[in-house]
Image (cartoon, coloured by chain):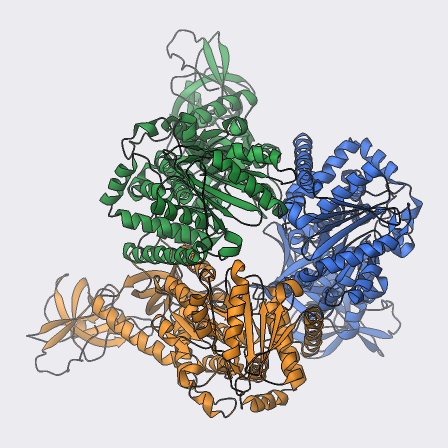
Chain colours: A orange, B green, C blue
Amino acid sequence: MTRESAGNSGDDGYSVVYDLDSDCTVDDISHDTPYLAEINGIVDYGVFVDLSDEVSGLVHESVLEGTYAVGDELVVELETVRDNGDVAFEPIDVDDYAVQAVSHDYALTGTDRLEANVGEQIHLEGEVVQVKQTGGPTIFHIADEYGVVPCAAFEEAGVRAYPQVEVGDVVRITGTPEHRDGSVQIEVDGLSKLDDDVAADARERIKAAIEARAEPHDVDPLIDWPAFEKLRPDLKEVAQLLRRTVLEGRPIRVRHHADGDGMCAAVPVQIALERFIADVHENDDAPRHLVKRLPAKAPFYEMEDATRDLNFALEDREKHGQQLPLLLMLDNGSTAEDVPAYETLAHYDIPIAVVDHHHPDPEAVEDLLDAHVNPYLHDEDYRITTGMCCVELARMIYPDLTDELRHVPAVAGLSDRSKADAMGDYLELAAEEGFDEERLQDVSEALDYAAFWLRYNSGDQLIQDVLQVDSDDDERHEELIEFFAERAREEVDEQLDAAMAHLEHEDLDNGAHLYRIDVENFAHRFTFPAPGKTTGEIHDRKIEETGDPVITVGYGPDFAVLRSDGVRLDIPRMVSELEEEVPGGGVSGGGHLVVGSIKFVKGKREDVIDALVEKMEDAEIDEALSSAAPIDD
Amino acid sequence: MTRESAGNSGDDGYSVVYDLDSDCTVDDISHDTPYLAEINGIVDYGVFVDLSDEVSGLVHESVLEGTYAVGDELVVELETVRDNGDVAFEPIDVDDYAVQAVSHDYALTGTDRLEANVGEQIHLEGEVVQVKQTGGPTIFHIADEYGVVPCAAFEEAGVRAYPQVEVGDVVRITGTPEHRDGSVQIEVDGLSKLDDDVAADARERIKAAIEARAEPHDVDPLIDWPAFEKLRPDLKEVAQLLRRTVLEGRPIRVRHHADGDGMCAAVPVQIALERFIADVHENDDAPRHLVKRLPAKAPFYEMEDATRDLNFALEDREKHGQQLPLLLMLDNGSTAEDVPAYETLAHYDIPIAVVDHHHPDPEAVEDLLDAHVNPYLHDEDYRITTGMCCVELARMIYPDLTDELRHVPAVAGLSDRSKADAMGDYLELAAEEGFDEERLQDVSEALDYAAFWLRYNSGDQLIQDVLQVDSDDDERHEELIEFFAERAREEVDEQLDAAMAHLEHEDLDNGAHLYRIDVENFAHRFTFPAPGKTTGEIHDRKIEETGDPVITVGYGPDFAVLRSDGVRLDIPRMVSELEEEVPGGGVSGGGHLVVGSIKFVKGKREDVIDALVEKMEDAEIDEALSSAAPIDD
Amino acid sequence: MTRESAGNSGDDGYSVVYDLDSDCTVDDISHDTPYLAEINGIVDYGVFVDLSDEVSGLVHESVLEGTYAVGDELVVELETVRDNGDVAFEPIDVDDYAVQAVSHDYALTGTDRLEANVGEQIHLEGEVVQVKQTGGPTIFHIADEYGVVPCAAFEEAGVRAYPQVEVGDVVRITGTPEHRDGSVQIEVDGLSKLDDDVAADARERIKAAIEARAEPHDVDPLIDWPAFEKLRPDLKEVAQLLRRTVLEGRPIRVRHHADGDGMCAAVPVQIALERFIADVHENDDAPRHLVKRLPAKAPFYEMEDATRDLNFALEDREKHGQQLPLLLMLDNGSTAEDVPAYETLAHYDIPIAVVDHHHPDPEAVEDLLDAHVNPYLHDEDYRITTGMCCVELARMIYPDLTDELRHVPAVAGLSDRSKADAMGDYLELAAEEGFDEERLQDVSEALDYAAFWLRYNSGDQLIQDVLQVDSDDDERHEELIEFFAERAREEVDEQLDAAMAHLEHEDLDNGAHLYRIDVENFAHRFTFPAPGKTTGEIHDRKIEETGDPVITVGYGPDFAVLRSDGVRLDIPRMVSELEEEVPGGGVSGGGHLVVGSIKFVKGKREDVIDALVEKMEDAEIDEALSSAAPIDD
């Protein structure tokens, strides 16, 4: 609490005299204001008075009247502060006054001005977002309105300093910014938890500032696309959530579908987050520690991955005092199959955001998500791919990235064979950057191929080189893409050479062609392309060869993948029906109208597939339907 | 060797005059004791004498008689030590004397008093337990009677200091304790290997002290259980071995069965060891470096795990100069199947201790183990679970843990369906801590479920949260356990929905029900529950449905798991017979009377199972027999 | 450019006067040489002159004639340099002169003389081989004629110093060698990129010196073996390439066949490289960072491994500023199957060297390799094993290793059942070291066994203990080898016990015995020995039992491994024919005349094997042919 009003100088009596707190300095004194002083020394040319521990000065004998003893109180006002720092006061004649305390005005230095104050003692207020006990000092990571800074407090080596202070508390720190391992760190001289009401104010102030800074950038869309505009408010919400998460110092774990569209989604967002983190955090290692991208092979969030993610998060909290992360699911995560994994995380209050374009089960997931973007929620469909969404998302987070991303939506669209009207505009946009359709197709194939061999590895640098984002050598990487794409095509051809000979054809009653392929027995296993892609490639060839309508089923010992063009299969309904019709079949699965996969127990494969084909006979022909978004296995 | 007796002062002749070793200091001098001195300087007010390299002083001319030359010997006794450190002696008249050497009295400072001596030079004696060459100094980890401390000796950067000193040597160190990265470390001024006889004495003294400190705590059993008391001496032996291992600075590698009982065994012991290590070691990182818990999926110690363990141990020795570890096998390790892995480690003199409650092959393993606890060795059985044993073991190691462990034996018992009489007491004990049977059952299911998805990951924090040991948020984790338990039950139900339809039933001649299930073809693969648990769940349902006697066989392409209640199968005997009866069947396996698993080559499955069923027809009915301890796969 | 000739002193006129560059010091001045000076001060006892920024001195009034003003030029020569560093000049009378610039003579201190100059400022010229940005300084690793040294330049913490300087530039550094973490590092005072022509000279000089140092040691072969001599020049080329790679500071990644011969090849080369790196690099961690050995299970370089290798290399470049590595393929890598992986690396200009003794496809790989050693390229064959080659290679790189390697070629030969004439000499050589044939055989079996259980782990220490290279405890490891070898034999026996009963025998028309074994159905899976070794062991037993000619086929669901003794199969030709003859069979594979493996799709197994056997009927008998080099799977 600082002084509320300056006193009036004059001959008439004063109503208020100010009493400086012991930690007040000369900076807390105003002119023409009465202060309570105490005499601490008498010399022949005057008396010395103390106004606080830090503020002393002379009252010259020329302005003194009467006699004084050490310890006497005196009301004074500032006469002058000399160049050498000496302070002179003059006594004020005041008969009747009320005393009001003045607390030291700690001028706060925001984390945006630390570099300019290196070596100077400053004051900082902020929220504790991480408390890491090292072998030496305790490191409090403090977020204020401007950023996050590590503050090192030393109690005893390896001993927790300020044990009463925890993540989430609002604190005031007095300390000195210093360079340390390439970053600015504050060496803490004092740290105090703010009192509840003061903390509430500060928290409110910081929160408001963070909320303001979290506001996503208002970027113009790369292309003009009305359908997409419906999703924009949801994307802005995710952008705000992610920026806020960064500003609050919370880690982000990105899980994404390990296919072309998934990587076109995840890589731009990852880079945007890394750059924003670098801006926000004083600590140079923060981008590496606070964002992790992890590919997922399954088309949903598996319990195994969730358990692993949770385990890592708990270990990071234990070892590094980090907050538990936010989970960002990309090109995955909208369906009921994700629920068990989400519920596992929910017990640890881990926030979850999803951007996906697979057919969602909104009622199943909605309660578990902090944000959810999916074109189906706005009567749009898979044609707006996750990559297209996430390029805009990345730009809302970090607009300077725009120039590196113009070709990415086209790659995403080609990867998922999007038939969106906007594809033309995206292709044109990419062409302006030197990516003609052939090259884009190569990038898409190369992404798929590299992702397959990288398995569970994110392969940051290699994927960035393939996608040409945050990558530096154009010529070489053009060669690389050509090479990977060519290898991918050759290996697909090899696989299909074996498989096509074993394709079983059937004319369904509804006029559709049905193709079946036993991918376990007539395709190579554990190699590129995997069963899902193998089935898709066969399907595409057969559409080209015969024209719609075509259904293709690729089956293994305990699974089948389905693709349809021109026939409304409604796979979720089929699965429910099969569950009942094939007792002991252990049928489960998912997908949407024309793309999906089914699992069953090995011993009931024949029954399940027979029942399935029977259903296909009756399925409705609808030539508008196309199985674009591919299924991986 | 220090001075044995002080001389007598007086006028009569002395029998002994003491001769200080060159490294003696003033602290080695007593009053009223004659010392041999040599004159090294003559001044007009007296002569200066040397008693050792470190001790010189003046003999004032007023007390001198006769003439002296530099180099003359003189017998003196201490007159005074002035405040400024100057020492004055006076001559002693002594005619006939024997000279006795006085060695410097290195007052040793134990590792228990280092904190109080930071910044002061001290002496320390101990055994070298680790020698780590860093890029800078060589770090000798020294164990004395009180603990273990790292001592940094610098020869030249990256160059091995005192290359003649190795792990196992007893040394005397002169150095200065300093804080370093949150721990106390001694900066070495001098280090010498003790002479053989001195070393033997010191080693004896340290060993005796370590042995005394290794003595396990004499804790009262959590419940009164006479059967258990038979195992207590063996457990004390293991506790002593583990405490001694910690005191000797040797790492410990815990391998445990990755099921509920196995984790109820391993987690308490891990935490007890970590806390004891933190007490013993000055180095804060020691608990993390010196104890590792590793789940094992197989019901025995596989060669692959042993090779991996050995490889890590050798690398740690190479990189960090660590001793090779002690291996602690929990809820695993008592059988002949463990022998090849044990023999591999035996070539590197790696000690092995086992606490297990599976049917043991004592004659096969005994020679390879340093300690072995198993209820069958005392005519008890699996009903005393490993978790029950290890809670007592953990308490013997670190009794302060007791309050966190009271509910754990009940979880262990429920996990392994122990029918021990003591279960009632354990359940009551748990109930007092707020764990009713339903909650305990949830913990047990949740452990199983989490362990399945964690695969080979120890998941320390998550498992501690599930087990509620060394965990902090009661409410949240109660929710977590409920959720995991419910998921586990749902997924078991789903699996059984598919499987039960394919169960084959047969009435055996001996009156038992035989159920067979093809888990490869009629259960989902690679998901929870695995084949062993699937078989067990089916078995339990059938017992409930039909009453004893029931045998259940779950078989895959090259394995079968067996469960029996009320029929004496004697699986080890069956396996031996099948080996002979089915030539080329590649039959192997293990287990005990009513629980076990058999492996064979795929192509002989039918022959093996037919022969097996034939044996079951003849098996003796014994309603007391129950297949409680589950089998994992 | 330094002064070309000293001037002549005398009374007659001078033709050349030297003008010191501004950075010249007193060390650049010679006696009796005229220098251009400028007067910068006049005092009553003389004038002060500047010869450069660093060189000033007095010209005493006693030797001056006439009057001078500040700024006047004066030609002087050195009179004296006083002990206190003061310099005196005297004026020279010179009428007509040409001025010639003198640049500062930076006496370079090579990286071989850093230890002697610790704490002294030095100059160093060299090529930048790594630029690592740390949180603090930027670390430039500089290679000169003598070695590589890290040089720390500090701009601002975490900020790239000298951003214009990149890997590959030639620079001159002024700095001070200091001890840092056990190594010598130069603290940079100044760093400049050399001008193009100067750089070219320096680069030429450094390159010539590196080339000279890269020259492999001229070691006498361990045994006298004319056939081997044909390969020696190629091996020297690889040795030179590897030594040059080390001298240039580039990392080396060794991929090798994970069998006995592969490890006898890779381990000696790894150790030779590590020791050479330790000699060359000032940084103690360099051996660990710059050479990695990785076993590969497949008999060729798989895309998955190449993708992983590339990904790691790109990450190391990103994180540590390392050059991309050289890939060294050992006992693997000569065939067309390696091409896709090689082409992937080729896009990143990663050099590749191969030492292999499997039947090569030189035309397929030649363009992709920087060096290729293979006995078949010299009309020799697999009998010269890769291990034999690489022991000589290791000795060329680091001859001091010789004494530890004498027994290794014999192990390599036995592992691959080499029937080379030289085997006798190698066995004799090993016997001199105490390795009789039985022990060598044990080492070979033990290597195989340990490699199997280590899976993808290199297991450095354990493998060195087994191979007895860079290992210290003879007795224990002899026991270890015996134990592993015995386990290996027991497990082979167990496997064969099951399998032999199911062996199908056929007398082929050409008189050969054909044995077939279904290793999927009649051998244990996922255990030692794997299918390839199982087949080989059966084959060996049958040869012993029946005598040549024998063909053995071990087949699984989608693969077959082939071994022949006494029959010319020509597997590559068979594979090409089968590709055509079995449409939709997905046939691929490789190998050579008598050893190979074939892949196909599961559903066409019968067709493929029938067609294969038909071909075998017609295969030519050639008793000289032996299937020595084993195939792994």
Q: Nearer the viewer, residue B209 or B33?
A: B209
Residue at x 54% of width, y 33% of height: B336
x and y percentages locating residue C290 in the rendered image: 67, 56
- Whether residue A309 is situated above or below residue B188 in the rendered picture: below
x and y percentages locating residue C374 in the rendered image: 85, 54
Is residue C555 shown to the viewer in this render? yes
Along the horizontal axis of the image, is B95 left or right of C273? Answer: left
x and y percentages locating residue B369 in the rendered image: 51, 30
| Residue at the extreme right of the image, as rendered | C226
**Picture quadrant of residue A128:** bottom left
Report the quarter where the N terminus of chain A lies.
Answer: bottom left
- Whether residue A278 is situated above or below residue B427 in the rendered picture: below
| Residue at the extreme left of the image, as rendered | A96
Along the horizontal axis of the image, is C537 left or right of B319? Answer: right
x and y percentages locating residue B289 in the rendered image: 48, 45
Q: Nearer the viewer, residue B451 or C582?
A: C582
Residue at x 31% of width, y 39% of height: B400
**Picture quadrant of residue C529:** top right
Residue at x 87% of width, y 48% of height: C218
Residue at x 91% of width, y 51% of height: C230
Is residue B181 shown to the viewer in this render? no
- Whether residue A153 is situated above or below residue A77 in the rendered picture: above
* Number of numbered callouts drawn: 0
Report the quarter where the C terminus of chain A lies.
Answer: bottom right
Q: Nearer the viewer, residue B163 or C481?
A: C481
- Whether residue A445 is situated above or below residue C604 in the rendered picture: below
Q: Nearer the viewer, residue C211 or B32?
A: C211
